[in-house]
Amino acid sequence: MKRYITVINILLYLCIAPASYLFAEVNKPEIIHYAPYLSSTKDSSLTSETQTDFAQKMMRASDSIRTIDSLRVLVLKEELLLVKASDKQRKKEIEVKLRNLERKDSLRIQAVNRKIDSLRKITKGSPVLLSDDTLFMIYTSYGPLAASERAKRVSESLDRIKTDYYLDSASFTLQKNEETYEILYNGNRIASVTTNDALWAGISIQDLASDRLNTISKALITYKESTSFTRISIKVLLALGFLVVLFIFIRLIHKGFKKLTLWFTTNHTAWIKGIHIGTYELLSVNKTLILLVRSVTILKWILILLLIYLSLPILFGLFPWTESLAEKLLNFILHPFSRFFAAIIAFIPNLISIGVIILITFYIIKGLKFLTGEVEKGALVIPGFYADWAIPTYNIVKVLIYAFSLIVIFPYLPGSNSPIFQGVSIFVGILFSLGSSTAISNAVAGIVMTYMRPFKIGDKIKVNDIVGVVVEKGLLVTRIKSVYNEEYTVPNSMLLGNYSVNYSRYSEEKGLILTTSVTIGYDAPWRDVHKILIQAADRTSDILRENKPYVHQSGLEDFYVAYTLHFFIDKPTLAPAILSELHGHIQDCFNEAGIEIMSPHYRAERDGNQVTIPAAYLNTDQNKE
């Protein structure tokens, strides 16, 4: 007998050796090869189809091992029955082998369950349908049939059964085979439940088979009841009644809006005044009325169409053949709204983070504004920091803080990681970098000039040929107003690249020195000329008295002496007026002193009895002569 059992063992091992080899191949090298798949819920590069193929391969290997172990258990149990009671050692060895096989089978099932758990969330199953209604999902293959083919065959079987007039729940039975449970209808198989299905579902194969049997039988009985003549007749009557009610509602909406339009037309003058923007009439009363009537008409049709659309799912839901269509129509409206509200709810934590960042930024800016005011007033003195730097520095720091806050907030914005958002950001960045080089250079020059302090608003300056008062200092340009009320807009980069003359910087402290020159002949005593020029300066208003004017003899020419008068003013913007008044006083003073201011060429050719001094300044004796 022992020899007979040994022969049987050898034959069984020869039969199951290929399956053992397959299991060894899957269990050893492919666990390393498919290791990324087992933790691949984080790896977006792996498709669910690839993972499902691996799961199917893993389960087929598990089936092979389970078959091998079942055969081994049968052989060991038969050998255990044939062992003599006296051979305790052999009996003990067989019992140890049986326990090892049971433990090995338990560990194998646990390992498969763990791997299936990692794939269950990302693997798409194939639905078993009854009139477009999903009864359950199939995830595993069975023999040569893939999961999709199994689901398709079960669905086709259900479609054939649902037309059976004698459909009854007693016609459904469950049959247990060696490795599967078969769901039968009148003895014909309509679906199979395998061990892999149970492993995937995480329950026993018997419970899964019973659950699917109940699901199929209840769904078919419900479909039969819902398609009976009595039930269909009642639903047809309900549909007709609903259509009548819908028609009445549409008529009421139409009449209501018609009366509303008529009321607008007859009473519009009492409350419609047109739309004005300042003194400009954007829409007259009649145009406003036309726009309002058209808006009411559009609103009426929107309500009617919405009412009809919402009524269609109710009508389609009455009949089993169109019930799935009703659900789709509802989803067209409900799904966007559900996604919208779900997105809002999911955005709440990010919204709180954005609010905190904005709040912190607001108080930082508020604190900086307070410190800027203190520095500008002189209450807070920072060594080496001028008071007129306070506002520009505040503006620069504020922009930097806002930019930093925007960078921090950006990842919390909805859609910030989307390709569209990123593409728009890159496009705007390219446009900004290509089209703003000049603007950036002017902005940088404006910032540099702020801290160079070459002039301030109100200063009289000269830049190249432009002379005027600074009326505006911007980030990009500086505006200068001339004495002729001409406004020059000068780019800051030009100001930074050229020299400028500031006439106002020291005018308040030391006074601005202005000059004017006259040429007098050698026959006039130079000391008298000095006195006359000083006298003319003393008569001129807005010339500083504490800083005395003085005269330089700037040249001894062939026919005359050049005298230059230097005087001080503290109002550079009045320089043209002061010079004009000074020139008038110079003429008066020289005429009073009897000294002519004239060209030596004219004097050489004129009649000696005539002088250019006005008669009012000459005495009688001089006139007689």
Image (spheres, rainbow, N blue to C red):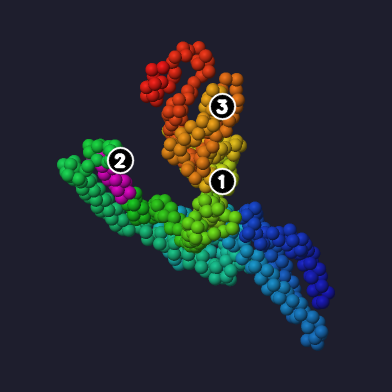
CA–CA distance in space, label 2 to label 1: 43 Å
Q: Residue at x 79, y 70 (%)?
A: 9
Q: Nearer the viewer, residue 519 or 452?
A: 519
Give the SS element for disc 2: strand
Q: Which residue is mark 3?
A: 562
Position of 509 with respect to 313 (left or right) is: right
Amino acid at circle 1: Arg
Q: Residue at x 64, y 57 (%)?
A: 43
Q: Which residue is mark 1?
A: 453
- Give the image location of residue 511, x and y in percent: 52, 43
Q: Residue at x 43, y 22 (%)?
A: 613
Decide whether residue 26 is among the magenta residues.
no
Position of 294 with respect to 59 (left or right) is: left
Q: Which residue is mark 2?
A: 277
Q: Which residues are magenta?
A: 288-307
Classed neighbour count for the residue bearing mark 2: other residues with Cα under 10 Å, few (<14), some (14–19), many (≥20): few
CA–CA distance in space, label 3 to label 1: 38 Å
Amino acid at circle 2: Ile
- Give the image location of residue 334, x and y in percent: 41, 55
Question: In the rendered image of this protein, does residue 48 appear above or below residue 486?
Answer: below
